[in-house]
Amino acid sequence: MKCLICETGNLVSASRIEPLRYKNSVLQIHGYLASNCDHCDASLVLPEHMKVNQRLMADAERLEDRLLTFNQIKSLRKLSPAKALCSCLALVGMR
């Protein structure tokens, strides 16, 4: 894909660590997706990256608030109610 800024270079997708200010701290978002231009060095977050990045940021905020992440909630939903309760108690106990 051509760069939207310089219209000369090509965009190359890459993951990185992105800082996120949340409440009174700075969280490190690992796996944050962005595209970099190989000509002008512009860094762009494309629409196809947004859903993944939003989930990563929401999970980082949830962890900071000592809540369950998206994947933890998703895995609990697949379990029977009794197993889900035991798993949830175990997850809460780890914090």
Image (cartoon, rainbow, N blue to C red):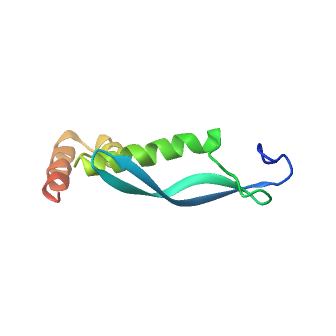
Point out the residue furthest to the right here.
Answer: 8
* Residue 22 visible in rendering: yes
Seen in the image, is 69 located left or right of residue 18? Answer: left
Seen in the image, is 24 located left or right of residue 54? Answer: left
Residue shown at 42% from the left, 46% from the top: 57
Residue 19, how many percent across, how many down? Answer: 44, 55
Residue 87, how many percent across, how many down? Answer: 20, 51
Residue shown at 30% from the left, 53% from the top: 25
In the rendered view, would you say 31 is above or below 72?
below
Seen in the image, is 72 located left or right of residue 91? Answer: right
* Residue 71 visible in rendering: no
Residue shown at 16% from the left, 52% from the top: 92
The image quadrant where one finds the C terminus is bottom left
Q: Which picture quadrant has residue 46? A: top right
Q: Nearer the viewer, residue 46 or 67?
A: 46
Residue 89, how many percent across, how many down? Answer: 14, 50
Instruction: Please count the marks in the image.
Output: 0
Residue shown at 56% from the left, 41% from the top: 50
